[in-house]
Image (spheres, rainbow, N blue to C red):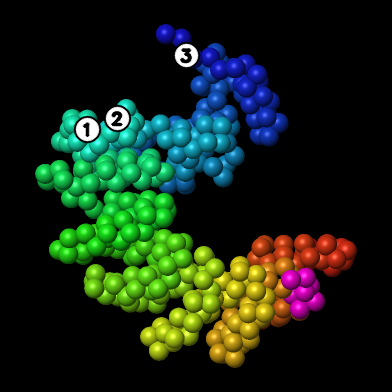
Amino acid sequence: MPPPRLESSILAAAAAAAACRFRKPIARTHEPCAVLRSLGVIVSCPPAVRHNASEGSPPMGLPPCFRQGVLPSGYLFGSLRFFHSSASECSSEVRASEILRTLKSIGGSGNADLGDALRQFADKMDEDVVLKVLQKQRSNWQVALAFFNWVAGLPGYAHGSRAYTEMLDILGRMKKIRLMRQLFDDIPEERWVVVVTNRMFAVLLNRYAGAHKVQEAIEVFSLRKDCGLELDLVGFQILLMSLCRYKHVEEAEALFREKKGEFPHVIRSWNIILNGWCVKGSFRDAHRIWNDIIASKVERDLVTYGTFIKALTKDGRIGPAMKLFNKMWEKGINPDVAICNCIIDQLCFKKRIPEALEIFER
């Protein structure tokens, strides 16, 4: 069978671009795939072996800085498509697709109908399949929960951390907070060590904060110790970020100050509160936190400066922002692109183009 033909216009454009860029003639061939491979548009390499970049010669049509081993197989017109996948992944995808088709066919039928329809998949169930099905049912929490509960009743199968976390996230996303908490409380105590993770608590805190249940979020954080996890600084910072993300900055700051004896006031925690006030649009409170950071003698970092400079520019205070920007350079903290863009944008808005160009050329 002759190889499939590609559009001649695509081949001609690709050949012209390669000739202009690399100044190398492209060998004529009647096989489109060979032409694309010579141009470096398609690069094939063994599916399971990745060679060092220094080994072998570069493929024809690619500059020397590229090597065959550093490009995945199936690199097609700038899209990363992995044509070679493991047999297990392929099998999981197929089973998940079949289950999804079955769930769609039974529609809103009861649990009995769901069990009858899915019985054929009972012997082939694993967490990878369950996770793929749940991820495709994120906007249909009833079907996702019914499937989750059906799988939990299969002999020889027990949900792992990934499946529990995904189901909790689905319920929280759909604001089914009571069901989310019930599912968490129903996790068998003997499986806490295996199932309950930092990622799961991060999901719970984020969803409670998103539902504006601040006190419940704080109570869930305290449950970490009961589940075998430490009440550590990282977990506390996740709680602060979740509260600030959904505009509960006042409560987050109060908790931050209240727990000073348990969790030290490191710069990352200060940055979370500072950013929370900036996102909420309260420049007065952001300025107050900035002064508190200075008074605390904690060393400010790039994030601290960037957050406050952004707040200053949003409030139209280009003078103080420029002063702080120059102070960063004096202290040896190089502003990143985001900070420079804030300053340049405000300078241009104020018609101070020469100063904006000076920063651009630094």
Mark 1 and 2 residues: CB-CB less than 8 Å, in contact? yes
Residue 321, by quadrant, is bottom right
CB contact under 8 Å: marks 3 and 2: no
Q: Mark 2 falls on what kind of element? A: helix
According to the picture, the residue beneath numbered tag 3 turns out to be: 3
Residue in the image at 16% along x and 45% along y: 153
> Vertical placement of 112 versus 141: above or below?
above
Magenta segment boundaries in residue numbering? 315-322
Viewed as shown, does residue 12 lie left or right of 299? right
For the N terminus, give its image quadrant: top left
Q: Which residue appears at 60% of the width and 73% of the height?
A: 277
Q: Which kind of residue does numbered mark 1 sit on?
A: Asp
**Which amino acid is tagged 3?**
Pro
> Could you give the CA–CA distance between mark 3 and mark 2, rounded to whole angstroms?
42 Å
Q: Would you call the spot at circle 2 few (<14 residues within 10 Å), some (14-19), or many (20 or more)?
A: few
The spot of residue 116 in percent (x, y) is: 18, 31
